[in-house]
Amino acid sequence: MSVDMRDVRVGGTSVRGTLAKRIVSPTDLGEAARIVADAAERDESVAFLGGGTELGLGYAPSRVDVLVKTSQLNRVVEYAPADMVVEVECGITLAELQRALAPHGQRLALDAPYPELATVGGLVATNAFGPRRMRFGTLRDLIVGVSLVRADGERVRGGGKVVKNVAGFDLPKLAVGSLGSLGMIATATFRLHPTPEATRVLRVAACDGPMLATLSRELFARKLEPAAFVAVRNEARASYDAYALFEGFDSGAEEQAVRFEALARDRGLAAERIAEIERPNELDEETRTHGDVRVRVAVPPADVVALERDALAPLARALRDAKTIVYPALGVAFLSGYAADVAAAGSALIGARSVAEGLHGNLVVTDVRDRTLSDAVDPYGTLPSSFFLMQRLKERFDPARRLNPGRFLGGL
Amino acid sequence: MLAVDVFGELSAIVGPKRTIVDPAELRTYECDGLAGVRVRPLAVVLPETTEEVSALCRVAKTHGLPIVPRGSGTGLSGGALPVDGCLLVVLSRMTRILAVDLENRRVRVQPGVINLDVSRAIAADGYYYAPDPSSQSVCSIGGNIAENSGGAHCLKYGFTVNHVVEATIVLADGEIVRVGEAAVDPLGYDLIAAVVGSEGLVGIVTEAVVRILRVPEATRTFFATFPSTDEAGACVSEIVAAGIVPAAVEMMDALAMEAIVKSTGVDWPLDVGASILMDVDGTRAEVDHTANAAVEIATRTGAIEVRTPKNDAERALMWKGRKGAFAAMGRVGPNYYVQDGVIPRSEISKVLREIAAAASREGLRVANVFHAGDGNLHPLVLYDARVPGEEHRAETVAGEILRICIRYGGSITGEHGVGVDKAVYMGELFTDADLETMNFVRCAFDPERAFNPGKVFPTPRLCGDVPGTYAPHAVEAAGVGRG
């Protein structure tokens, strides 16, 4: 793994540059709720800190009176292997959770970056995903229950511990991606999947944008079911290396691998088998944790060629040492690099965003270190027309605007 | 009686033919799939466009009429049951499939489109729409969105909320708003999650974009019989423990099988205690492996007989039997009450025994047909409405079943919704603060609670800090009772 640990601001005392006045680290959920309730009484603002791996998201909060570190809230609350459901406290890391599940041949089907650092609370708050999204979706598709500490300190829950449940409004999914602005994510309950018996990873080197689109289309046309299909930009060769990951029982994974080799051959390319089974996952992490400016771009999957040509390539040229990973079948890409020339980086970011928005997509700046650049480029871009409903939700959940105030979309 | 001016305003929008106020005609709309509860709406309107729905909501607002949206009216929890004095907005004429986008795997539909028609429209291209409630040949996408419908195959593929990516909704003041994004990750809060499963409490969906999936390369089905539901339950648990993710696993007990055999003519044996119907799907070699492994597990866990269909027609017949289970109940009892509860899968055997005990205490029988893979029970409480008191005893049993589900850490509904039928149990599943928080969501969309008042929440809930004074509608204050 080549993760640059200098980029992880664990134990930080600020959120997007806003210094926390006080940092607390509760040891149980009751204490966490009391901290939030006390803050409410004093009209103090509260923000939450997990592994600190996504602190670059959003705007600088207007104030952080109390920063609640969740690292000591790391228990497995309930794990029923026979039901393939687990409830955990927010501060447990993804890797720790996976280690608890592994002896039972189960896993949370989520391969987000920084598993040793990223906490469940943070993963929920940011709707995390990795390359296996192709098969399993994002955290939104895996969560079945949540308990929250509300702005007033009240502990509430939604969903439950069974996978199938339509009783009441879907608070778990509303918490997903809410960036700590609706409440503290205290515990989360997930559906689990079996750990596959076998894995095959294949690489097709030197693809251009149109070839990525072709391979993606062919995967569907031939009814293959990869767990992941991602393409990593090789800047030196000005092309992409595409990786397909097949999981399942041994005979099934092998058959898919053989058919993928045939698929590549039919296009005049060679699919090479890669030994390291976690490869696409690591490549994804490398890109998403690299550089001093990072973005996530999403467009309709059919527009992936335009995305690559008109948004990603120019942006990569404007940054030093750029890394790019594309999920061609999903129309999603991550790009990171160093803003050596801040003015050029700024205009390239704005240009790439305008391309993405022109395709009915979006570009989110997920991290940016340079203050000038950060001021020049909005983290989110054009607000959705439904933003007024989001404002109304925020007003209901947090009427005094004390939860991570100003950090989320549109300054919610 | 409807004031003439309101009729005039409604019919000015949708025309007199699509404005129903005649008491005889209104009768059709007095109830949905929830048997035994009827409330006459003030008026029924049948809009055909988003703009018409918007204009209708403005009229309702002007006159202070509650609004109840309705799709095909097949819901089993009373979600589309009128409330007294309401404007019932029926979306069943909005049946156009607006766009098929195979490259992005999306279909844009109007809310009245029938679930199965989405799959039919794309079948030739090798795609399908995954959520498959048993009523899929008659229920509408709009209703599926309101209820977050599931179905047998949601075990592997997820529920409606996992397949709707964009919705156009009309709010109570007539405002038209688009939530979600057709093909990309939307920014901000997950408003789709707020709308899907909201049971008609936040707005009227007038257009939706749904994800479609590739039809899997291979599907293997098998049907196995067991001495009792204990062995059948153990079989399901072992299959799951072996790392197999079935596309669907359905279980039926002896009484349910008897009804299905009598009703559909499938040649299932009647001298067994339970059966399982299971699908695995995926790529060919993977499915060969999982199907063989599952059959082996069935045999090992005590299956009396395992049948695999020889062709698609045989497979279709097996599934027809399962999906026709509710309708078949008339063969074993004059009336039945469909319950919908969820329990952790591993507790199936214990819960079934408790349900049987609860029924026998009231002198009734329960047939069980359920989605065993995810612990979603559908006990069918059989009764004879002609026998005084029996209907009431059936309701007692049905209620007791929900309490059993709650006690085992499950839920009071896996796919039918809360509606009016189960609102009273919400307070047993959730705390007051939980419900208050859910009410935040509703109030953000509909601060005056014009939509579907009296549903889902056990007691009328105010929205608070809304500018101006709000008087709850008489119906909401009184609650909507059962008939």
Image (cartoon, coloured by chain):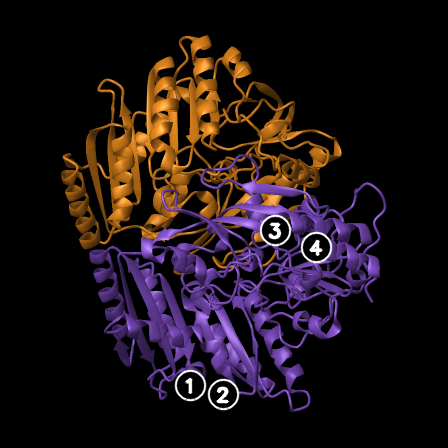
Q: Amino acid at mark 4?
A: Phe
- CB atoms at circles 2 and 1 under 8 Å apart? yes
As drawn, which residue projects farthest toward the bottom? B387
Which chain letter matches label 4?
B
**Circle nearer the N terminus (2, 3):** 3
Return the residue at label 1.
B258
Of callouts 4 and 2, the N-terminal one:
2
| Mark in the foreground, 4 or 3 | 3
Mark 1 vs 4: CB contact within 8 A: no
Task: Inspect the image, locate mark 3, and give the three-letter code of the amino acid beneath it.
Answer: Thr
Is residue A43 or residue B470 the one in the foreground? B470
Mark 1: few/some/many CA within 10 Å (<14, 14-19, 20+):
many
- SS at mark 4 in the image: loop
Q: CA distance from mark 4 to mark 3?
A: 19 Å
The residue tagged 2 is: B332
* Quarter of the picture holding the N terminus of chain A: top left
**Horizontal side of residue B66 vs A183, given as left or right:** right
Q: CA distance from mark 2 to mark 3?
A: 44 Å
Dot 2 and dot 1 within a common chain: yes
In the rendered image of the structure, the colour used to display chain A is orange
First along the sequence among labels 4 and 3: 3
